[in-house]
Amino acid sequence: MGEHHTEGPSDVEARVAALETVLVERGLITTDTIEAIVQAYEHDIGPHLGAAVVARAWTDPDYRERLLADGTAAIAELGLGGAQGEVIVTKANEPGVHNVVVCTLCSCYPWPVLGLPPTWYKDAAYRSRVVREPRAVLSEMGLDLADDVEIRVWDSTAEVRYLILPERPEGTEELDAEALAALVHRDAMVGVAVVAAP
Amino acid sequence: MGEHHTEGPSDVEARVAALETVLVERGLITTDTIEAIVQAYEHDIGPHLGAAVVARAWTDPDYRERLLADGTAAIAELGLGGAQGEVIVTKANEPGVHNVVVCTLCSCYPWPVLGLPPTWYKDAAYRSRVVREPRAVLSEMGLDLADDVEIRVWDSTAEVRYLILPERPEGTEELDAEALAALVHRDAMVGVAVVAAP
Amino acid sequence: MDGVHDLGGVEGFGAVVVEADEPVFHHDWERRVFGCNFAAIPGGVDAFRHAIERMGARAYLSTSYYEHWLVAIETRAVASGIVPAADLEAARVAVAAGAPVPRRDDPDRAAAMVAAVQTPSRPVAGATGRFGIGDLVRVSRRSPSGHTRCPRYVRGAVGVVDALHGTVRLPDASAGGREVDAPLYGVRFRARDLWGTGAHQVHLDLWEPYLEPEPTGVTSMGEHEHG
Amino acid sequence: MDGVHDLGGVEGFGAVVVEADEPVFHHDWERRVFGCNFAAIPGGVDAFRHAIERMGARAYLSTSYYEHWLVAIETRAVASGIVPAADLEAARVAVAAGAPVPRRDDPDRAAAMVAAVQTPSRPVAGATGRFGIGDLVRVSRRSPSGHTRCPRYVRGAVGVVDALHGTVRLPDASAGGREVDAPLYGVRFRARDLWGTGAHQVHLDLWEPYLEPEPTGVTSMGEHEHG
């Protein structure tokens, strides 16, 4: 280490620009494809899509049943699916059972319903710890589970992606699916949080 | 990372000087103890001591037997032993069997007979690889073992320290113990080399 | 390979740090790397991951997620032969000296890609394999030096099959360009069978070649209560 | 703890780099750190090692051997209460501003220390434990968050006892200041029982609490040929 500078952003920026240059020059991608894809994942594909799935399941018992039996197909009913969500399995939280998702080997995440993962999901601390001491990790992240709640950790080691169906909070009987969806946030669908009543 | 400097030697030097200051001020150590200890390990305690043990074993079959039965006691016969060598076990290379020593968890090494370990012994590459692919590691380090040689790797996970007794090379029948000791080098007593004929 | 990317259960990474109101990307170069990954480069996701795994332990832990992606795309582009390493380096030198990145557009192609990534697939699950729901399995200790999706922390551990995912491309093979299919199972482990302690369960999806049948009954970890 | 210091079998660290004619120390500060470790600080070698293990994964892999020692000595000096952290920091600031390191000598004490480190000990091996030479043992999967000398790469693996080292202080306890003795065994493993492949043997010294009895006979890895 010593006085040697670590590789800084400017080096990385040059490498990225060089990569884009050679890929575009060879016709392997176009500039507007790069920009349209970024636009899609930055603005269109995000946790509001998963929230719509959850709200539908909360308000439609038949849909909930289909979602838990074949997540991919039930999610496709809403027109959702695609890259990094070729197979989606949904696991329901229920009284006494809490589910939480991780990818210890890289950062697999159900893009079509949650968008791109947050940094903490990709970092070593979460990936290393949640399979070993999920209760401590969840508590640090603000979710204190009762001692008698069984925690099930889903490590995404294959191309199956996991979506957690949170419990519907009390006092939301009067809300419609749209209002319910507004309550559902990313962390609850990864399983590091629950959905609070409004 | 980015533009941030990694901690350089000057920071480390200041921390070391501060540590020495507080330890000396409190009488927990004296300056001449630091210097005498460094002097001892830099000049007096080194692989020439282990070489004397090996040469004795090569020239005295009874000693060899005692060395392999109770290394600590046999080595103490030569006045050797002490810190990081409270228990020393000697393993003999022989036709068809080659032994090699590592410490995967830190860098345990038989100081009283070999002195302080070289950097490669302490580095991650050797520590990680030699328990998994010893033949490849030894080959990279210049020791190509025949396919039918059984390799035994000794991982120093407790306070037992391992000294390898190399095979006496051919053509050394006329040499006395002192001349033999001059042939024996550190790497052969760790097991990453053999002793060549003069 | 048993690299440092295989993080399950490794201690010493501190607290989980959550950034409030985190943006999707933090730097514009991250956007460009992300987009470049949709280029028509041979080699699938397994080759992508294996390229990252081979970065080297210290490099992996000292660089960010999208720097890993950059390495993966560079590695695949060069390894596949479609971009000579010298061309990439020449472009880097040119860019560093101020050369602009060329712009080429094709609106139909861009729209098609955006549609493709949002098109649900309906994979046909193939035949399943030798294990059924409720079967006990022991994860092989096999530790391949190539790509694998069998993490170290379950090696040698006993679990119970609780999902049949059909027959799926085996990453160990496809990372190297070979096409081998194998049954994929969901396997449930008790934390105490992994770490000796803990009341939780850990579920992994594991391919049949990672698994060995385990006789039902008493093991060294105590009687199985999986069923 | 299962930190990155537990390197056995981890891939991604490249080639073994050998420095020709390497000196014992590369920098004078390394000499001083080495010498300072002979100060009268409470806490033995296990506390020393555990302090290094708790450095943090990235710090461990990005700093040198004697920087690890520096951390260990600082940590033990502060944790034992004999050097307040504030005093250490004040000394660092003073030294960085040019303050000289004080010199105090005591030739008798120096000579005694040099003699002590070269005085052979004759440890009395205590009673041995439940296992005998030739017994099959399976390493526990227990993965303590504190200090341990049971590496990850043998957890859950089956080996054969081939040395009885008597009863020895258990590092898992002594790193935290507790004194617990336990039988220590030499245990031989076949490489293929660790990694699924390889013709070599790996020997470790393991304390009885790390081990469970394993019935002789056929296991999932095939028939044992250890005996």
Image (tube, coloured by chain):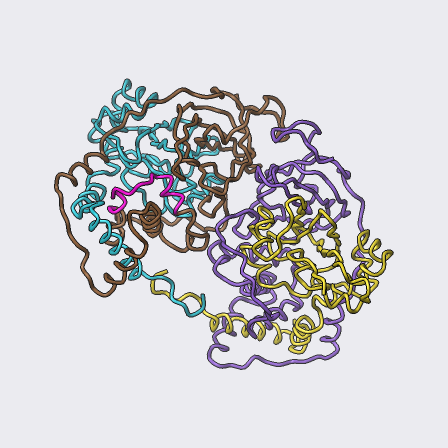
Chain colours: A yellow, B cyan, C purple, D brown
Region of the chain picked out in magenta, as a range: D35-51
Relative to residue A13, is residue B157 depicted above or below? above
Give x and y (percent) for residue B115. Answer: 27, 39
Q: Quadrant of the C terminus of chain C?
A: top right
| Label tally | 0
Left or right: D208 with respect to A131?
A: left
Name the residue nearer the viewer: C86 or B111: B111
Q: Position of residue D78 (x, y in %)?
A: 33, 49
Residue drawn where x is 24% and y is 49% of the image: B23
Identify which residue is drawn at 35% across, 47% down.
D79
Front residue of C88/D205: it is D205
Residue drawn at x 20%, y 64% is: D98
Taking the image as shown, residue D112 lies to the left or right of residue B109, namely left
Where residue B80 appears, as percent x and y from the top left, is 23, 30
Along the line of sight, the residue nearer the viewer: D141 or A55: A55
Foreground residue, D70 or A194?
A194
Residue at 71% over, 36% down: C226
| Placement of C222 over or under A52, stated as above or below | above
Q: Is D37 a magenta residue? A: yes
Query: Can residue D205 be seen in this snapshot?
Result: yes
Q: Quadrant of residue D181?
A: top left
- Residue B184 in sight: no
Q: Is residue C114 left or right of residue A1?
A: right
